[in-house]
């Protein structure tokens, strides 16, 4: 226990001794730290003074340097301003000099302008005087001279236009005409049809002149019966051994001819027998009509026609137009149109069908009012023909504008068939009137001296006054005459217009 107490006391004493020892040590350390701190502070103050002096020196150096640079820059700017000022002064001097030159030139121009104006006034006076003198010498006013000049220019323009027209036509027609001519020639070569010229009368031969009395009968009863039953006139005159049957309807005329021939062959001529023979003749003619219509369709290779159209075609055998048999003409138009359609790649069937039916209206134009074109169009519609065929029929005389190649081909084929030599025949009176009209149209144009219709009206030769016309203007005259002929005349085929300008000089040796 004592040891413990002693130990505790020793420990306390040790702690107290250690406390004092640490205290002395701490005090000694604090004293040395304060001394060190004072030293550091003094050194820092000295260093700060030194740094301050250095900074002040550096600032002075920098300020001096900046001031030198500023003064240098300022000096350069002053020099530049001085140079700019000198340049401006120099430019002002140049501008002043140029302004003076411009003023002098302006004065010179004003002076020249006044001189020009004075000369213009003088020239105008001279020009007016010359115009007056020229008018006095020529005897023409300015307006008249102007008109002469315009006419001269116009004539020159017309001449150039005529030359251009001729050249264009030559180039455009060169190939077209050749090809068309080849196609038409080929079509005509392949097509051959007879042209039968018929009249409105038929002649029946008699075995002797005594037969005339038997035909007339007692108090004319036989001839009256025959005329009433057939609707034709029977002419018995001084012609030996012949009786003339006259009538505009060829079918009635054919019926009367057949009946009269059978009556003459039979020898029994009286009203009852006449009536019987006329009925037989009618049936025979109807059968002929049917057979001819069917034969026409077989010849042209056209099938599917309505039976009534076939009969109407057969009636065309007894119909003539300008002396041309209409059925043969229709068959020929069908052939020609079909051949040309094949050459051109058009519809051959439509062309041939329309060609065969184009004049179908002529089969009944004695019974129905209106032109045969309209009648034919109505018949084609009635019997359910195609629109292309109906259109070609309606357009084949130019009543409407053709809208298809086939319609144009029908027009061409119709004209070709009608224009064949011997295809048409005119009365002398109609022929003379046509020639007179042709010459009248030709003479109506200015510059034409005289004209002559030649080649049976297929050519008109026109002589023009050489002092009024020119070589180029006759081209335009020919075109104008052709246009007027086409507008005012009806004629078969085509008419050649030949304009001739001939200059002659005549003197007499005395």
Image (cartoon, rainbow, N blue to C red):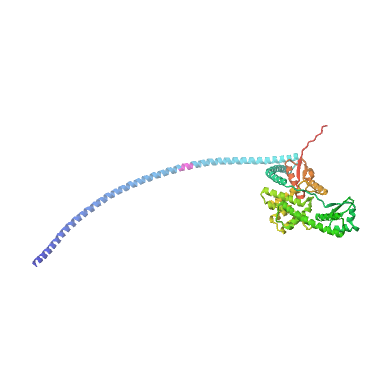
Could you tell whether 266 is left or right of 87 in the image? right
In this view of the protein, can residue 401 be seen by the observer? no
Asked where in the image residue 282 lies, by quadrant, the reply is bottom right
Name the outermost residue toward the left: 2
Q: Is residue 218 above or below residue 336?
A: below
For the point 14% across and 61% down, the residue is: 18
Please tell me which residue lies in front, 215 or 189.
215
Query: Which quadrant would the N terminus be assigned to in this image?
Result: bottom left
Magenta stretch: includes residue 85: yes
Q: Is residue 436 above or below residue 361?
A: above
For the point 70% across and 48% down, the residue is: 339
Name the outermost residue toward the right: 219
Could you tell whether 210 is left or right of 29 in the image? right
Query: Which quadrant would the C terminus be assigned to in this image?
Result: top right
Name the outermost residue toward the bottom: 1
In this view of the protein, can residue 94 be seen by the observer? yes
Asked where in the image residue 379 lies, by quadrant, the reply is bottom right
Please tell me which residue lies in front, 265 or 305.
265
Magenta segment boundaries in residue numbering: 84-89
Residue 344, position as x, y percentages in the image: 67, 48
Magenta stretch: includes residue 320: no
What kind of secondary structure does the magenta stretch mostly adopt? helix
Please tell me which residue lies in front, 428 or 120.
428
For the image, the number of numbered tags is 0
Residue 321, position as x, y percentages in the image: 78, 51
Residue 503, position as x, y percentages in the image: 77, 38
């Amino acid at each position: 226990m004592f040891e413990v107490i002693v130990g505790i006391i020793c420990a306390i004493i040790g702690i107290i001794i250690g406390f004092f020892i640490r205290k002395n040590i701490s005090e000694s350390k604090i004293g040395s730290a304060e001394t060190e701190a004072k030293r550091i502070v003094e050194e820092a103050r000295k260093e700060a003074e030194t740094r301050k002096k250095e900074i002040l020196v550096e600032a002075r150096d920098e300020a001096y340097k900046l001031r030198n640079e500023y003064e240098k820059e300022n000096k350069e700017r002053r020099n530049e301003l001085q140079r700019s000022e000198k340049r401006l002064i120099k430019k002002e001097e140049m501008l002043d000099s140029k302004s003076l030159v411009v003023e002098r030139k302006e004065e010179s121009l004003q002076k020249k302008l006044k001189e020009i104006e004075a000369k213009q006034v003088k020239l105008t006076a001279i020009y007016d005087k010359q115009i007056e003198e020229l008018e006095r010498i020529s005897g023409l006013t300015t307006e008249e001279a102007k008109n002469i000049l315009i006419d001269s220019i116009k004539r020159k323009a017309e001449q150039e236009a005529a030359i251009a027209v001729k050249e264009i036509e030559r180039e455009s027609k060169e190939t077209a005409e050749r090809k068309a001519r080849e196609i038409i020639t080929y079509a005509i070569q392949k097509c051959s049809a007879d042209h039968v010229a018929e009249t409105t009368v038929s002649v029946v031969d008699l075995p002797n002149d005594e037969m005339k009395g038997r035909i007339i009968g007692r108090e004319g009863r036989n001839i009256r019966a025959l005329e009433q039953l057939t609707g034709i006139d029977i002419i018995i005159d001084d012609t030996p051994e012949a009786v003339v049957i006259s009538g505009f309807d060829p079918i009635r005329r054919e019926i009367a001819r057949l009946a009269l021939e059978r009556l003459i062959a039979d020898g029994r001529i009286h009203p009852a027998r006449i009536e019987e023979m006329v009925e037989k003749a009618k049936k025979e003619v109807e059968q002929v009509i049917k057979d001819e219509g069917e034969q026409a369709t077989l010849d042209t290779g056209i099938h599917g026609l309505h039976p009534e159209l076939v009969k109407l075609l057969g009636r065309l055998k007894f119909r003539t137009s300008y002396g041309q048999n209409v059925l043969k003409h229709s068959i020929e138009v069908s052939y020609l149109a079909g051949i040309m359609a094949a050459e051109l790649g058009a519809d051959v069937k439509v062309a041939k069908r329309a060609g065969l039916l184009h004049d179908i209206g002529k089969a009944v134009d004695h019974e129905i009012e209106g032109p045969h074109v309209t009648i034919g169009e109505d018949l084609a519609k009635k019997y359910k023909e195609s629109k292309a065929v109906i259109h070609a029929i309606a357009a084949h005389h130019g009543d409407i504008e053709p809208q298809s190649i086939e319609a144009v081909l029908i027009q061409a084929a119709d004209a070709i068939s009608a224009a064949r030599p011997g295809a048409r025949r005119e009365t002398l009176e109609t022929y003379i009137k046509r020639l007179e009209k042709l010459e009248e149209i030709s003479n109506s144009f200015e510059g034409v001296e005289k004209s002559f219709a030649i080649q049976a009206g297929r050519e008109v030769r026109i002589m023009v006054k050489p002092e009024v016309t020119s070589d180029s203007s006759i081209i335009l005259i020919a075109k104008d005459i052709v246009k007027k002929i086409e507008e005012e005349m009806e004629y078969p085929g085509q008419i050649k217009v030949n304009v001739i300008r001939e200059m002659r000089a005549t003197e007499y040796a005395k």
